[in-house]
Image (tube, rainbow, N blue to C red):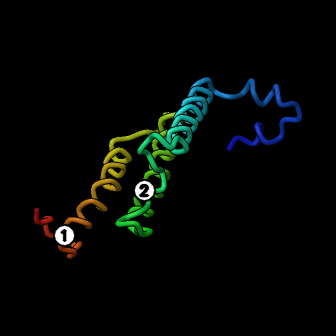
Amino acid sequence: MDHALMNCADWTDWLAQLDWMVIVLIGTAGIITFSLYRAHCNPENAINLVDLVLENGHMSRLATAFMVSFALSVWLMVDLQLHGKMTEGYLMAFGGIWISPIIAKLVFNKAEPPAPAKP
């Protein structure tokens, strides 16, 4: 972080140093978060944000790791892009982070699917 931002005594100076893309990013993230929260709290809506880390009603290590890696990698990609340091290698690493958990679950998951219900 820029030390000039940390040493500003007046918040208007700090605000003037913000890049407009950071402001757009913060606003967009806020709107998305608020919309998801409203959908989560609405009893008529089937969206439940807790389901993102559950598997068969129990906490899933893989789902939790997946969500943490999502948050970290998206933050990293946005930060790299905002600072003009994005390269193809970073983009390939981002793709690898997303493909490896899916392949691991497909290859190493030995759970049998449930039998179809008989009429």
Secondary element type, mark 2 = helix
Q: CA distance from mark 2 to mark 1?
A: 20 Å
Count neighbours of disc 2 (C-alpha within 10 A) and say few if under 14, some if 14 to 19, many if 20 or more.
some
Q: Amino acid at mark 2?
A: Asp
Q: Nearer the viewer, residue 80 or 51?
A: 51
Q: Is residue 37 above or below residue 16?
A: below
Return the disc, 2 or 1, that comes first in the chain's sequence: 2
Residue for badge 2 = 51
Secondary structure beneath disc 1?
Answer: loop
- Return the residue nearer the eye: 94 or 88: 94
Most distant residue in the bottom direction: 110
The label on residue 114 is 1
Answer with left or right where residue 117 lies relative to residue 9.
left
- Give percent across and percent down for residue 9: 89, 35
User: In the drawing, does residue 53 fall left or right of residue 11?
Assistant: left
Q: Nearer the viewer, mark 2 or mark 1?
A: 1
